[in-house]
Image (spheres, grey):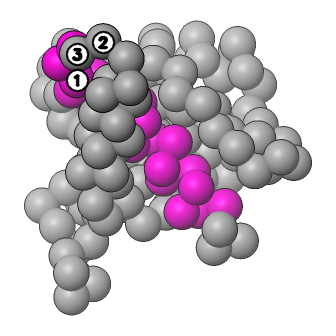
Amino acid sequence: MSTVLIFDFGLKRTGVAIGNTIVGTASPEETLISATPGKPDWKGITRLIEKWNPSQFVVGMPKQLNGDDTELSAPIEKFCNQLNGRYNLPVAQANEQFSSIEAGRRLKQVRQAGRKQKVSKEEVDRVSAVIIFENWYQSQ
């Protein structure tokens, strides 16, 4: 196993990153926009799979502070099952608690070092996927 496709699934946007389990790093790839809220962009996902040929998927799963499910838990669980069913690759779930907050913080730090520019939701989604990979990789 070396290449992993990571998803920060959302009902409108899904951030995607590419991870490498040999070196333990990930890079933001792109943000897929759902044409229909809650329905994944399967064409975009297939294109990324063909481009990167991953051996596994990692999907962020949000939890409440007390460990309970959130309103996104069921749609994300469905997405995980569909990923496995469509592409026949293992799907791991990783804690994504606060990943969007951390992603926004990281992007703002980079911006402060350079030009001032607003951080887009799409950028946050991609960097959130990187953080999901980091959380998953550290737990392995």
Q: Is residue 47 above or below residue 103?
A: above
Residue displayed at 45% across by 41% down: 129
> Amino acid under label 2?
Arg
- For image coordinates 27% across by 71% down, the residue present is 63
Mark 2 sits on what residue?
115
Query: Do residues under tags 2 and 3 come within 8 Å of each other at their CB atoms?
Result: yes
> Where's residue 137, x and y in %?
66, 61
69 lies above or below 130: below
Depth check, mark 2 against mark 1: the one in front is 2
Which mark, residue 13?
Answer: none
Q: Is residue 124 magenta?
A: yes
Q: Quick check: is 88 in the magenta stretch? A: no
> Is 49 situated left or right of 7 in this image?
right
Q: Does the rendering let one see residue 93?
A: yes
User: Could one spot residue 14 in this view of the protein?
Assistant: no
**Which amino acid does the dot numbered 3 rest on?**
Lys
Which disc number belongs to residue 119? 1
Total labels drawn: 3
7 relative to 15, above or below: below
Element under disc 3: loop
Classify 10 Å Cα crowding around label 2: few (below 14), some (14-19), many (20 and above): few
Residue 132 in the image: x percent, y percent? 48, 53
- Residue that badge 3 annotates: 116
The answer to which image quadrant residue 85 occupies is: top right
The residue range painted magenta reads 117-137
Dots 2, 1 in contact, CB < 8 A = no
Q: Position of residue 26 (x, y in %)?
A: 64, 38
Magenta span main SS: helix
Residues under labels 2 and 3: Cα distance? 4 Å
